[in-house]
Image: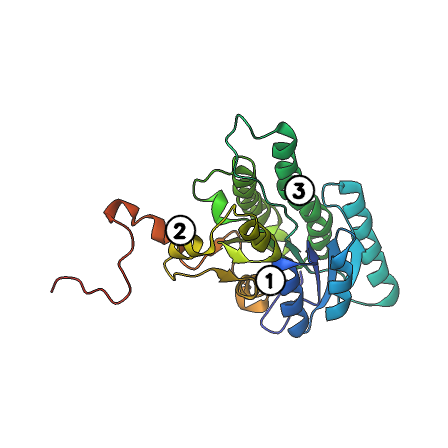
Amino acid sequence: MQQNGPHNAPRHAVISGGGSGIGLATAQRLIQAGSRVTVLDLAGPGEAAAAGIGADFFEADVTQEDCIEEIAAVLENRAAADGGPAPDALVTCAGVLQRTLPPETLSWAEWDRMIAVHLRGTYACCRSFGGRMAVRGVGAIVTVSSVAGIASGPLHGYGPAKAAIAHLAKTLAAEWGPSGVRVNTVAPGFTSTPALERGLAAGALEAERLARGAALQRLVAAEEIADAIAFLAGPAASAITGVVLPVDAGYLVAGDWAAYGGLRDAGAKGAL
């Protein structure tokens, strides 16, 4: 069985939703590390973004499992034909945001879309690419959950879908671990991405309030999420599988202080 050891970084990473935001930052980070990268995304600006960083591109809707399966087969067959690297890393970044509506006004169509894109899309990519990695005996998968899947919030479709992604990663880590495939999850906090910027512009979110809600008093940069993903996909994490890693500038820990009046002001001194 081939293993990802200290000198075997991913040779070919596939990134769903790699045309913008966290996915694009991850694609850039892995290319810098020497990996070949294939981006899966919807038609539009993502294709130009992928080309701009030297990544391959396939138009793909992650909710269409036949499309994902076809791409996985094409990449596998291409590698067999030309001797290039078959995908040995997968990052599932494809996602959409949900409006913060109460259950009685959140439509079934919007709820179904959250489950389809996030959970079904993640599973489809893992099934098609991870299954082939398991046959070859090597691979690393990083799924993208969210702090919304860990903490409570008014995201009654998005939050449960992201929680399910983290659980799915744990089951797949146990399923494919004996075959040499590691599966881990990152849980980003509020991250500076085009999607978040649209929420800020629409008035649905407030940047200062989001920053105050984190222990580090700031948003997370997409590049910081990319660094965590690259770590989990790479040789430095060769003994790590089944973990959920929050990358949230301390958002989760800061909330626990609300019962005590919130975080202290910077520089405040406690009693001696």
Residue 251 spot, x, y in % from top left: 41, 53
- The CA distance from mark 3 to mark 2 is 25 Å
The residue beneath circle 3 is 117
- The CA distance from mark 1 to mark 2 is 24 Å
**At 81% across and 67% down in the image, what residue appears?**
84
Name the side, left or right, on which 238 lies relative to 61. Answer: left
Q: How many residues crowd mark 3 within 10 Å: few (<14), some (14–19), many (20+)? A: many
Numbered badge on residue 233: 1
Tell me if residue 54 can be seen.
Answer: no
Tell me if residue 265 can be seen.
Answer: yes
Residue 102 spot, x, y in % from top left: 50, 31
Q: Are marks 3 and 2 in contact (CB under 8 Å)?
A: no
Q: Nearer the viewer, mark 1 or mark 3?
A: 3
The kind of secondary structure element at disc 1 is: helix
On screen, 126 above or below 156? below
Amino acid type of the residue tagged 2 in the rendering: Leu
Residue 210 spot, x, y in % from top left: 44, 53
Amino acid type of the residue tagged 3 in the rendering: Val
The earlier-in-sequence mark between 1 and 2 is 1
The kind of secondary structure element at disc 2 is: helix
The residue beneath circle 2 is 252
Amino acid type of the residue tagged 1 in the rendering: Ala
